[in-house]
Image: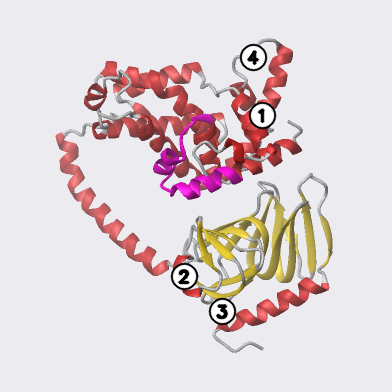
Amino acid sequence: MTLDLDLEGVRRRDAGALVALFERYFDRLYGIVFRLVGNRSASEDAIQDVFLRIHRAAHQLDPTRDPGPWLMTIATNVCRDHWRSSGQRLERASASIEGNPGLAETLSHGAKSPELEAQTSERERLVQEAILRLQEPFREVIVLREYEGLGYGQIAAITGHNETTVRKRHSRALAELGRQLSEMEL
Amino acid sequence: MSENDEDRLTDVSKRAKEILHASAPPRADAAFRERLKGDFVSGQISGRTVPFPQQWYRRAAAPALAVVAAAAMIAIVVEFLNRGPAWIVSSASGDGVVQIDGESIPITNLDALRARVRPGVEIQVPAGGEIGIFSAGGLAIQLTAGTEITVPPPPARWISRHVQLYARAGELRITTGPRFPGARLLVRSPDAEVDVTGTTLAVILNPIGTCVCVFDGTVRFGPLGGDRTPVPAGTRRQMFRDGSPPLDEPIRDMERMKLGMFRDASRPLLYGEPAE
């Protein structure tokens, strides 16, 4: 499935094809990256790295296949590199959002009234905080499964783990999230 | 379990799914998005022309590549020599089935356990069993019934000696050996972190939070992402999940006895000498 994108053009790095690819996938990839790394500035660094890698590897794209899994694999790998970097550990300590005023704003995009926006912001803040408290391998599975709607097999292919492990992680992560969200009275 | 496993979820998990699905997608700053799109399309991301090196660059790259290759070779050799002794399953007792990365292995099958336990695998000890692992000279860890952890890499010999162990449930006892000084083990539970630099201790994940019992030496213990403060020998500190202040009290006699037995039993593995 090529989703009417000009993937041959992407392989040749034609401007029009790159624009179409960007428009089709930016929001989705940004969503993944943001949920995984947890704050705006780190997400912007990471998504920039994602598109840099896409550009560099464009000639490797298989034009006969849906590029989505390939792109999500790149995004996931960038986030893993980000977690491994020592600087990120410091950021993570403050990623519980009290020190991250842009987060609620980022997540509450589209809220209508100030009151509704405030309620939505608080709720989104707590949800994202709960996601960030998951250990990284569990966070990956939750984001890819619950936000991207991927199957266990697809997640296994993206994360490099076997399907059984992915299923177990998903189940545990949901249970842990449920516990945390209950404690937050959501 | 089917692909659509909604019917097998607990109410708490179903509620978590509902909340996740109700949350709004994050949006990037519009100006940032436009700038990145322009950079992506033009190949100027991070100020670099991305994929098309010029001829002079290729000529300059040849010696640089040789240096990089040599450095990579050295790094590989150093990394190999730097590796700490591998984990060895020293004991497995009780009954039941151990889950290792989703694979079921009878706890009585010591050979199979030894073949499967390596850094990065997830171990779930059955309710009626207990497993001991060690890295010679470095660390010994006892996983009691019901414990779930991700096995960390063994502490390296000279550089990059910090390792992390993810614990999700149960109780584990840890003691360090003569090669551990200078290394560091960070034990992470869902709500707390324990910084181990040379000691014998237990980490207990209970329904109200996480507890450490320090038998000898000192550890630093605190909430996930928060300040970690020292817990001295002979002390038990309970960290509460609900945010209540931590509670310090003397280590309980039963746990003191178990930790003492564990440390003594580990000495031959870590020090190469008979147990006292």
Q: Can residue B140 be seen at all in this image of the molecule?
A: no
In the image, B160 versus A113, the foreground residue is: A113
Q: Which residue is mark 2?
A: B112
Disc 4 sits on a residue from what chain? A
Query: Which color mode does the image show?
Result: secondary structure
Percent coordinates x, y for residue A109 in the rendering: 59, 17
Amino acid type at image mark 1: Arg
Neighbourhood count class around disc 4 (C-alpha, 10 Å): few under 14, some 14–19, many 20 upward: some
Q: Which residues are magenta?
A: A147-172
Q: Chain of mark 1?
A: A
Q: Are marks 1 and 2 on the same chain?
A: no
Q: Residues within 10 Å of mark 2 (few under 14, many from 20)?
A: few
Q: Residue at x 63, y 87 (%)?
A: B275
* Inter-mark Cα distance, 1 to 2: 45 Å
- Mark 1 or 2, closer to the camera: 2
Mark pair 3, 1: CA separation: 46 Å
Residue A168 in magenta?
Answer: yes
Left or right of B134 on screen, residue B43:
left
Q: Chain of mark 3?
A: B
For the residue labelled by badge 1, is the local secondary structure a helix, a strand or a loop?
helix
Q: Are marks 3 and 1 in contact (CB under 8 Å)?
A: no
Q: Earlier in the sequence, mark 3 or mark 2?
A: 2
The kind of residue tagged 4 is Ala
Residue under numbered circle 1? A125
Q: Are marks 3 and 1 on the same chain?
A: no
On screen, A172 above or below B25? below
Assess whether mark 2 and mark 3 are in contact (beta carbons under 8 angstroms): no
Tag 3 residue: B270
* Residue pictured at 67% horizontal, 22% vertical: A121
| Mark 4 vs 1, N-terminal side | 4
Q: Disc 2 is attached to a residue of which chain?
A: B
Lateral position of residue B37 relative to residue B66, left or right? right
